[in-house]
Structures are given as C-alpha cells and as structure tokens.
Amino acid sequence: MIRTWIRVGAISGLVAAISYPTLILAPLPLAAVAFLTCLFGVSLSLAAVGGYHFIALHKATITLQIGAAAEVIAGVLVICMLLIQLAVNKTMESILSTAEAAGTTEIANSIWLAVDQVQLGIDVAWDVYISIGTLLIAWNLRSHPRFGPFFGWPGVVIASSLLVLNLVTFPTPPSQAGLVDLGPALGLWSLAMAIRIVLSLKWADQVLEARESSIA
C-alpha cells in the first residue's frame, strides 16, 4: 500500500504542478477552468499523502504529519476559493451588463467589491495552509537522503516568506499590495520535489524491500 501511495503521490504532484499554471495562463472555457480547478486541488491533496509516505521512509515526525495534513486541507481550500471566484465573476459580469444599461454600475461595482472579499479571505486561508504545509515538509527534507539541505532550506525560506507576506498584506494579496508574489516560486519548488520523488522510486522500493525482508 505504501509503495502504491508513493507512486500515486508522485504522479499527482506532477499533475498539480502542471495543471495550476495551465489554469492561470491558458485562455480556457468556463467548464475547462472548473475541471482544472478540481484536478489541481485533488492532485495537491493526493500528492501530500504520497509525499508523506515517501519522506517517512527515512523518518516519520510529527512536523511531517502536520505538514502533510496542512497540504491536504490546502487542496480543499484552493478548490473552494477558485470555484467561488469563478461563480462570483460569472454572476457579476451578468449583473454589471444589466447595471450599465440601468445606470447603476457604481452600485453594482460596490456589491462586487464586497462579495469579492469572500474569495480573498479563502485565498489567504489557502495560502496559509499551503505555506505551513510546505514549510514543515521542507524542514523534514533537510536531513532526507534523497533531498538534503540544499533542497530543504529553499523550501523553508520560500514557504515562510509567502506566509509572512500574506499575513502582512491581509486581506489584499501581496501582488496587489505592491509586493512580490512567491506563488510561482513555490510552484517551481513543488515541481522539483515531485520530479525528485519520481526519480527516487527505485530507492523507495529498495527501502521497502529491505523492511519486508527484515520482517520476514
């Protein structure tokens, strides 16, 4: 079961790392955006579980367990945030077109700004959970034989910086507050982690086989 989870997690990590930039950058119809949103969130949660089992082959710690749980929750929150964003934007576009004809555009814009705070709040919640999850997982990678400090420390720095920036600028996203958006950096780090796990599947099999042999 552990071997299967590691493979599912590795594939899910690659899917999550590819689906998110596609979601943000590619001009897609609403249905495709909704599908990619769900795919990204679910893949992120599955990657967290698989990544936990891989890292725990070396050492299972409470910080690793908390980090994996935080990333599972982050997967749920990002689906909620993006789907709410899609629904609100779609509805408000229709309302604004009607309001323009009726001369009530200013009122409609005020309503939109108020409602938009809902998804911004969930956006910060998602950033908090993904930052904490990545921070704790990266902390455990520092001593892992397939990662080490040169992989773990950058993850710690990126995740902790992302967390601080989001809390300092709340409820405005850092990018809209004139600060740097570390989301892409975190995404690239996560992609590198997923690739590293894929390249380390043979190592994972060897560790599991050694354990099975010792039990037998």
Image: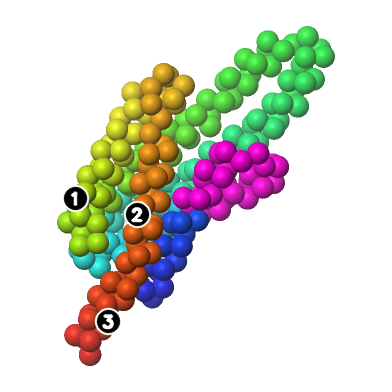
Decide if residue 55 is in sight here. yes
Q: Work out whether residue 157 or residue 172 is closer to the camera in this orientation and state it.
A: 157
Circle 1: is it few (<14), some (14-19), or many (20+) Cα within 10 Å? Answer: some
Circle 3: is it few (<14), some (14-19), or many (20+) Cα within 10 Å? Answer: few
- The CA distance from mark 3 to mark 2 is 23 Å
Left or right: where 166 falls relative to 120: left
- What residue is disc 1 on? 149
- What residue is disc 2 on? 193
Residue 39 % position (x, y): 56, 53
Residue 58 % position (x, y): 21, 65
Amino acid residing under circle 2: Met
Asked whether residue 175 is drawn in magenta, I would say no
Query: Quick one: SS at disc 2?
Result: helix
Q: Residue at x 28, y 56 (%)?
A: 65
Query: Quick one: SS at disc 3?
Result: helix
Q: Quadrant of residue 167?
A: top left
Q: Quadrant of residue 181?
A: top left
Number of the label disc, if any, that sits on residue 209: 3
